[in-house]
Amino acid sequence: MAGRFAPRPQRAVVRDGMPRRGTAPGRVRVWVPDGPLDLGLVLGPLRRGPGDPTFRTTPDGSVWRASRTPAGPGTLRVTARGEEVRGEAWGPGAQWLLEQLPRMLGSDDDPAAFVPRHRLLALTRHRRPGLRLTRTGLVLESLIPSVLEQKVTTLEAYQAWRLLVRRFGEPAPGPVPGRMCVMPAARTWALIPSWEWHLAGVDDKRASTVLRAVRVAARLEEAAGMEPVAAQERLEVVPGVGPWTSAETVQRSHGAPDAVTVGDLHLPGIVGFALGGDRDADDAEMLRLLEPYAGQRHRAARLVLLSGRVPGRRAPRMAPRGIERL
């Protein structure tokens, strides 16, 4: 569920007071948003677990991202200072990342379009004025980890993403904090041996879905220029990519405010409990409760998750299956 939590700051690995690796300055862009902006809330959905090798936060409040752009691999450091946001980028994809910076920070998003119909959402929006919906413009980097999250625990999915990116990705360019990596190229994903998927805890069904997706990577990346609904339709042409996966993808790649996640194990109960007092709500009931927010249903679900109003647990967490040990 995109953006339930903002990322926790992590300790940077430093040497002589500077992040590890080279210290060559990158390209810089300064941008001034037209309203409040919370980097953690906006970019948090792009982090796939605390050990995500493509995402880091440092004690100075900076957010680091390593991406595979149409121009090649690149690293972006984003820092907010007062009313300004400073982006610094390295690598072949540096210029592309800086051009995309305002969209990634929600410049295309319109928070004012959301009209709260529930007191809980009105209070949450008031307390979180810096919430905007990110738009990365990159489809595959959101699609693949979403596929890995299908029908498994969050812990298993994050572990699989971390292991595969570190094993088959490439070092992120620039003076990055710690060990950051750029995710593998489409061809590299296609050449990962079956046993490596198994060792990462990924079953054949999810691995096959990723392989089918990367074979048509160029066509899928074209969806970044489509409207979210059309983009979801194109993604769902790939066998194994359904409404849950396509929604999780366009929420990040397109900043789609209405792409509500259906088919999730927990979200209907959370939304049902927060808006209707029904912890046993299904997808149909969730969509009914979100109907007043048509056009902004994903934002409404984000605000529900950020409100902290969730039902208490009735059973222990689902235990990871750990197929890599078989």
Image (cartoon, rainbow, N blue to C red):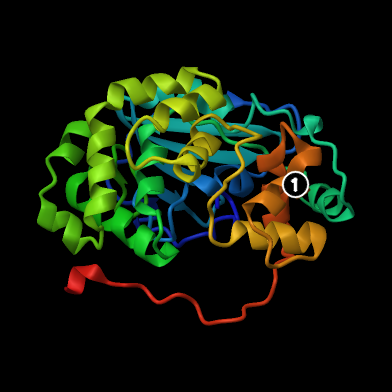
Q: Amino acid at mark 1?
A: Arg
Q: Is residue 263 left or right of residue 112?
A: left
The residue tagged with tag 1: helix, strand or loop? helix
The location of residue 265, given as percent across then percent down, is 53, 61
At a point 40% along the width and 54% down the height, the residue shown is 149
Q: Residue furthest front?
A: 284
Residue in the image at 36% along x and 73% along y = 320
In-front residue for pair 170/45: 45
Q: Which residue occupies the foreground of this view, 27 or 240?
A: 240
Would residue 261 appear left or right of 286 to someone viewing this image? Answer: left
257 vs 292, left or right, is left
Residue 50 place in picture, x, y as percent: 44, 61
In the depicted structure, whether residue 274 falls above or below residue 33: below
Measured along the vertical axis of the image, is residue 220 above or below residue 41? above
User: Does residue 131 appear in the picture of this structure?
Assistant: no
The residue shown at (67%, 50%) is 284
Q: Nearer the viewer, residue 150 or 46?
A: 150
Q: Name the spot of residue 86 as percent of width and height, x first.
A: 56, 32
Name the residue carrying label 1: 288
Q: Is residue 291 above or below residue 282?
A: above
The residue lying at 18 percent from left, 60 percent from top is 198
Query: Toward which corner of the image does residue 172 lie, by quadrant?
Result: top left
